[in-house]
Image (cartoon, rainbow, N blue to C red):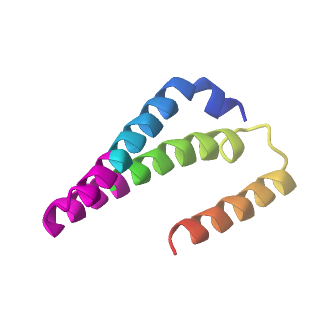
């Protein structure tokens, strides 16, 4: 999957940021902070995860669905695959 290799630094930066946010959430829970702070941290993690998903999905769609040299059958299968991933993500 060359698009994840090309954007690896950007993707890893986002993942590390999410990891830091999750660790921050754990610290909040262990220190028994107010629910509002916990909820705010969960919302931040969700936003960061959504941003990561959009970046990777956009790259994937451009490479696997938008390229001119993809045969129609392969393009159709890629579309089916992406739709399955989106359905599971949006549950």
34 on left or right of 39: left
22 on left or right of 44: right
Instruction: Give the magenta range.
Output: 24-46
Q: Quadrant of residue 39?
A: bottom left
The magenta stretch spans residue 44: yes
Q: Residue at x 36, y 46 (%)?
A: 23
Q: Residue at x 54, y 65 (%)?
A: 89
Q: Is residue 24 above or below residue 91?
A: above
Give coordinates of residue 71: x percent, y percent.
85, 47
Residue 39 or residue 26, whichever sits in front: 26
Q: Is residue 31 above or below residue 15?
A: below
Give coordinates of residue 61: x percent, y percent.
62, 47
Q: Quadrant of residue 42?
A: bottom left
In the picture as drawn, the residue positioned furthest to the front comes out as 31
> Which image quarter is the N terminus in?
top right
20 on left or right of 57: left
Residue 57 or residue 72, whichever sits in front: 57
Q: Residue at x 77, y 53 (%)?
A: 75
Number of numbered tags placed on the structure image = 0
Q: Residue at x 78, y 59 (%)?
A: 76
């Amino acid at each position: 999957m060359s698009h994840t290799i090309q954007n690896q630094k950007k993707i890893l930066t986002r993942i590390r940021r999410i990891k830091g946010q999750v660790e921050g959430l754990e610290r909040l829970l262990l220190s028994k902070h107010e629910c509002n702070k916990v909820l705010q941290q969960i919302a931040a993690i969700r936003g960061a995860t959504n941003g990561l998903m959009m970046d990777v999905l956009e790259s994937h769609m451009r490479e696997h669905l938008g390229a001119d040299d993809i045969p129609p059958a392969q393009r159709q299968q890629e579309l089916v695959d992406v739709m399955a991933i989106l359905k599971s993500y949006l549950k």
